[in-house]
Image (spheres, helix red, strand yellow):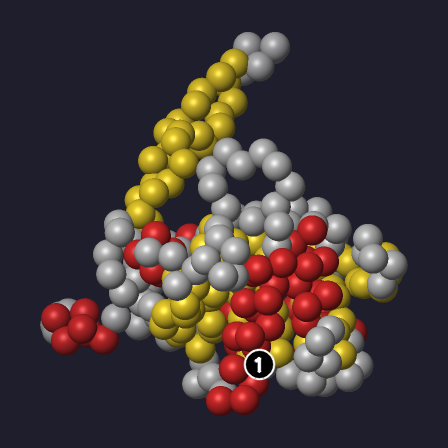
Amino acid sequence: MHILVTNDDGVQAPGLLALAQEMRKLGRVTVFAPDKNWSASGHVKTMDRPLRVRETTLADGTAAFTSDGAPSDCVALSLLGLVEEPLDVVVSGINPNANVGHDVTYSGTVTAAMEAVIAGVMGIAVSLDSPEGHKAPLDYSCAASVARRVVEKAAADGVPQGVVLNVNVPFLTEGEFKGYMITRQGLRVYRDALDQRIDPRGRPYYWIGGEAPTGVDEPGTDFGALRAGYVSITPLQLDLTSYKAMDVLKWKF
């Protein structure tokens, strides 16, 4: 199996290293990730400037590719031929925070996996639900082990065409979490606020701030599963059509 490992936190992020090391237990691994943090970048494809790619070395001494493009650019470049050997699966992560509910539309981690699925390659995103304000270095070993088990299962049993697997791992040891749950996308509650300030020249500038987001703790959802101590695996479809709305919008012009 040939696995592409990417992320949205940058090629030197510890979560990516942990993921790559665990994926090597399954087969050949190519690492290709952005050269900077692209968190909350969404699904980006760079079309208006050239993309630069260079080789780099991870903290464990292994080789990797990096680019000044977005996470989805890294996946697209790989699938378009920069990585010569065909890829069987793209695994994106490990993000240091959960990607649940509407987060998936913002997340560079999830949309990198989406880029793979658009090209007909299996895509899996992996995130760790670390506590807000956690200061100590994160231990990604449990999340990496979960990722390996999910990739093994997906490779063996298959994933429906056009589906991205969004995996969120509770901030627990592998012996503490209660198991794995196939979930639906839940509801994220954002508490954003506009922070307006004045620069030294008297001109206004703005930050999008506010308190950390929460979510609706509903059974069967990604957020609810994490709160209950389960690994959440949400199959996301790329077809965003609301078929129920089509039945309602019987407009005549």
Q: Foreground residue, 177 or 205?
A: 177
In the displayed structure, would residue 188 be above or below residue 196?
below
Residue 169 percent location from the top left of the image: 48, 59
Residue 250 makes an appearance in the image:
yes
Q: Measuring 46% from the left and 66% from the top, which residue is drawn there? A: 166
Side of 196 where 134 appears, left or right: right
**Within the image, what quadrant is residue 223 found in?**
bottom left
Q: Please tell me whether mark 1 sits on a helix, a strand or a loop.
A: helix
Q: How many labels does the image show?
A: 1
In the displayed structure, would residue 10 be above or below residue 247?
above
Q: Foreground residue, 193 or 231?
A: 231
Residue 1 percent location from the top left of the image: 69, 85
Q: Measuring 63% from the left and 58% from the top, which residue is drawn there? A: 141
> What residue is pinned by disc 1?
152
Side of 25 where 220 appears, left or right: left
**Within the image, what quadrant is residue 151 found in?**
bottom right
Residue 253 makes an appearance in the image:
no
Q: Measuring 41% from the left and 36% from the top, which residue is drawn there? A: 212
Q: Measuring 45% from the left and 80% from the top, which residue is drawn there? A: 162
Give amino acid for label 1: Glu
Crowding near pointer 1: few (<14 within 10 Å), some, many (20+)? some
Q: Image quadrant for the C terminus?
A: bottom left
